[in-house]
Amino acid sequence: MSSPAWLVVGNKAPFNVMAASPELPEFLEFEIHEVLGRSMRMIFGPMTNVAELRKAVIDSATKSSYTASFMLYTKNGQGRMLTVEIVPAHNGDGEATHCVMTIDHSDWVPKKVAVAEDTRAKLVLKADKPYSVECVSDNFVQLYALSADSLMGRTLRPIFGPRTDAQTFDA
């Protein structure tokens, strides 16, 4: 797997990109010269949590770091779920005037995508323990011959079999 990409972004509006890593095209298909001096909003799209990302960039002036998954968009408008870590960067006077956004691949899927109607059997779990079921697709219910009511609000234990390693779900 390749190294993460990074952007150096001003922590005040318009959040212009000051520098970018050579890995950026792999993640977002933008060449470095295409992003320099432009606002970071060029990587936003309809499913980007813009308010949270902007707040994290602004807060980087007073906090040590922030990490979350965001839907960012490629040059061609394709959404990609990526993990973004934001850490403050300081000028010569020690003032945090910009931040470094490290961008890496993510395993997270946004809830809007997870609950979208399609042919896949899927369920959505809460991200915190006890990892209870928030919603379940009709195809998932049919696959396991269960009712949605028997899963909602419960853990995955009803579908564990004799060879399921329950310890992996407690990690």
Image: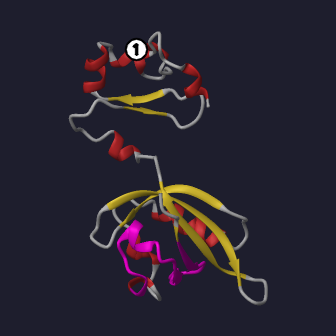
Q: Is residue 130 at least partly visible in the picture?
A: no
The residue shown at (41%, 19%) is 151
* Residue 7 among magenta residues: yes
Q: Amino acid at mark 1?
A: Ser
Question: x%, y% of residue 115?
Answer: 33, 39
Question: x%, y% of residue 25?
Answer: 39, 73
Q: Residue furthest left?
A: 119
Question: x%, y% of residue 5?
Answer: 50, 69
In the image, the segment drawn in magenta is 6-33
Relative horizontal placement of residue 25, taking residue 6 as reference (left or right): left
Q: Is residue 4 above or below residue 153?
A: below
Q: Residue furthest front?
A: 1
Residue 145, image quadrant:
top left
Q: Is residue 105 above or below residue 92?
A: above
Q: Residue furthest right?
A: 93
Relative horizontal placement of residue 110, taking residue 130 as reference (left or right): left
The residue shown at (41%, 87%) is 33
What SS does tag 1 mark?
Answer: helix
Q: Residues within 10 Å of mark 1 (few under 14, many from 20)?
A: few
The residue shown at (47%, 52%) is 106
Relative horizontal placement of residue 5, taking residue 151 as reference (left or right): right
The residue shown at (28%, 41%) is 116
Q: Is residue 150 above or below residue 124?
A: above
Residue beneath disc 1: 150
Residue 146, image quadrant:
top left
Q: Nearer the viewer, residue 46 or 80?
A: 80
Relative horizontal placement of residue 101, taking residue 133 as reference (left or right): right
Q: Is residue 142 at least partly visible in the picture?
A: yes
Question: x%, y% of residue 89?
Answer: 68, 77
- What is the quadrant of the C terminus in the image? top right
* Residue 20 among magenta residues: yes
